[in-house]
Amino acid sequence: MNLSMTAAPAAATEPCDLSATEAAAAIAARELSSQELVASCLNRIARRDDAVRAWAHLDPEQALARARAADARPPSGPLHGVPVGLKDIIDVAGMPTGFNSPIYPGYVPAADSACAAMIRKAGGLILGKTVTTEFANRHPGPTRNPHDPARTPGGSSQGSCAGVADRQVPLGIGTQTSGSIVRPAAFCGIVGYKPSFGEVSRVGVKPHSGSLDTLGLCGRSVGDVELLRAVLVGVPYRPEAPSCLSLRVALCRGESWEAAEPCSRQAVEETAAALVQAGAELRELELPPAIFGGWLDDHRRIANFESARSFGHEKRLFADKLSRDLYEGRIRDGERCTVDDYIAAQRRAEAMRGWMDEAFDNFDVVLTVAAAGEAPLGLAHTGDARFNSLWTLLYTPCLTLPRGTGPNGMPLGIQLVGRRFEDERLFAIAGGVERLIAAGS
Amino acid sequence: MNLSMTAAPAAATEPCDLSATEAAAAIAARELSSQELVASCLNRIARRDDAVRAWAHLDPEQALARARAADARPPSGPLHGVPVGLKDIIDVAGMPTGFNSPIYPGYVPAADSACAAMIRKAGGLILGKTVTTEFANRHPGPTRNPHDPARTPGGSSQGSCAGVADRQVPLGIGTQTSGSIVRPAAFCGIVGYKPSFGEVSRVGVKPHSGSLDTLGLCGRSVGDVELLRAVLVGVPYRPEAPSCLSLRVALCRGESWEAAEPCSRQAVEETAAALVQAGAELRELELPPAIFGGWLDDHRRIANFESARSFGHEKRLFADKLSRDLYEGRIRDGERCTVDDYIAAQRRAEAMRGWMDEAFDNFDVVLTVAAAGEAPLGLAHTGDARFNSLWTLLYTPCLTLPRGTGPNGMPLGIQLVGRRFEDERLFAIAGGVERLIAAGS
């Protein structure tokens, strides 16, 4: 297993190769202009777009004009002059939003989403809209895995993850209702992070399932994602010192373990061994079947019951323009779920959250698989979300780190899960694990 | 105290006087056309609009055309041909949405909100958009209390409640983040209902506080609101048999009791006495200070922290077009709240919800005040929300019933609170209490 593989090259040769924190520091120090950075990203996109197809909307002239305007202003925040790609279900004033659906041709939102406004307030630029699966469900867009165009980048936040992995943009925003940020980030070999439920505003993001939808962030390092998280939460950016000393790690195999490929399990087990080597205390996390027995069904019931209502407008007027995946697989299934079954699933999910919160008294972080394995061949299927949807249901922060490659040379990820609302602690731990991996462990 | 006072007259003389369930039944039986009903509502509005000013957008020709189209179609659902008024923060495709703000002139949403789509699917008509306070916060619109135009109708769902109370429309939809449906319904002498948090989709409703915003429903009887709730949840309409037999009632005075006027406390105590007379078992609900001590501050922290982010776009570009109430009172306050204080408030709120859910093992319903007293004089202030915001924070369903009048002849309400996710049980109880009140108890 080649451990050094990451999406970033060994040495940065162009501004687009810089991490977000490096680029922000260089711009703040006037060693780099926003215009140079954006032009470098646009050049990279021009060279690579035929292969990767990460963008649903991109207006290079407008992006350069915004960069020049940023260069002309005094620095206004920690993202000053740094471009971000936003998934095409997230409103940006003045940019078309298409949801990867034929239902909204030419639709341009009147207002920024909360996250777009927070990025702009922090001095950042919206480079463009990144490809999403249809309404952030399963029906894929044209995006390809930058490591192998014959393979899916995963979904639903496919453009954000592929674009960041390919160094077309340093930061991306997506969403996660099941596994829509962690899985594609793992498939693309970057850091993907789903915040604690409720901590990052979803205003202006097309809803799928109100009880589960969470923004998702991606970048090429833990520090980059941490910077973007501070901007989106609206708190000062004070990076945590990376630390995985005296760590109590809970290895979660769970029922999904056997469904993961050996390479993915091996990445987790080798990370666990490296952590032990570094002084961590390792235990197994057993999820009691009496509480967690039906979580996958409960996640589906909640997601689909709510989706059947969220898409009330589209299903009433445009049912023929919805994919079968969305219409039959989600909406019709959600219509068949009774309100009593929905409520029972919500109550069980609350019990699971309570159990998990108490369980975190006994460990600092959960270590588990991020995806079944390498990104599968083909673009039609974006992969299995079961390795992620439990943590979405539990409202816990979770983060995938790239760790090595699989039998086909594609990136593999591992997943770290923190206690709900202790996202900063998770960043400290993930930063430590990231160093451990970089050191070859 | 005059107990028989309600907004409806003694005998229905025009279609607009019919309750929603009566109107729906008459339309289904072909004894009434939707066109007759809508024309009657429009006539009532034409006569009363100068005094009440409940509507932010109304297109009579379009409304009549929709009614004629409904009459030409076979019945399509339980609301067939029945008009509903929607608060002007709720998207309706093709109708302007203004939020009672100068920031969005001419804005017309591209899609229906989930609730608008559910109403149309059930055969209902959107009559128009009803006046809201600015972005459903405190800065009032022009709406007056139909019982006395010198008094506020309450807020923020002021147009929906005033319009329903004045028989301009049989059903209205608003929202509640603090007390925005129950308080104006009580001030206007109608039934107002906030569902269990999470049960009715908020898709397409301008967000204020994602953790607290809930749709609110209003009508002139418990049965009408129950019908509308079934439509919005997307479940078959099977009205509960009204029942307050063998009821275990918890009277909640709490810390807010002394802040209520004597007339409001008397309405609650007389209702409690009537319930005991009818065989109910009465107990006091004491909220333990160790758990509930800071609920009002916690509600404010959560609401304002989230509002500061929800209005990220408006505050960045249009701060000068926001009222001081919203900008200083909410947004700036929310910016000053640290994320740690926000998280602590969320954790305490979750503990309160857990406590209340267990407490419901010992009683069937909570009885408490709905508002401080009668609607205050003047239009500048919409009243004190503290009698409602606890139940919004607790995610419990709550409902106000009109009960008698106060010293100035204005309507008074009482409030019933059910266990979270047991909204149907609350309707059964409220139906029983409604009968008890109608019988003069």
Image (spheres, coloured by chain):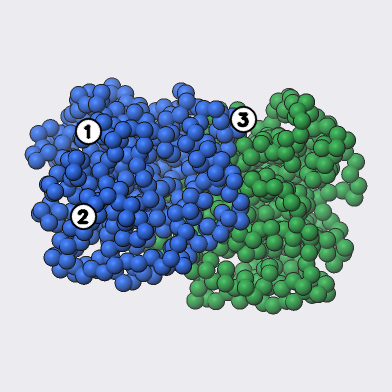
Chain colours: A blue, B green
CB of mark 3 within 8 Å of CB of mark 1? no
Which mark lies nearer to you, 3 or 2? 2
| Residue marked by disc 3 | B95
Where residue A148 is drawn, which disc sits there?
1
Instruction: For mark 1, name the chain.
Output: A
For disc 2, the marked residue is A266
Q: Are marks 3 and 1 on the same chain?
A: no
Percent across and percent down for residue B55 are 68, 37
Badge 1: how crowded within 10 Å, few (<14), some, or many (20+)? some
Q: CA distance from mark 3 to mark 2?
A: 57 Å
Dot 2: within a 10 Å radius of its alpha carbon, few (fewer than 14), some, or many (20 or more) residues? some
Quick one: SS at disc 2? helix
Q: Residue at x 36, y 37 (%)?
A: A381
Residue B359 visible in the snapshot: yes
Residues tagged by mark 3 and mark 2 found on one chain of the structure: no
Mark nearest the camera among 2 and 1 is 2
Residue A140 location, quadrant: top left
Estimate the x, y position of residue B120 in percent, counting from the top left.
Answer: 67, 35
Q: Is residue B319 above or below residue B385?
A: above
The amino acid type, in three-letter code, at marker 2 is: Gln
Image location (x, y in percent) of residue B20: 78, 44
Q: Nearer the viewer, mark 3 or mark 1?
A: 1
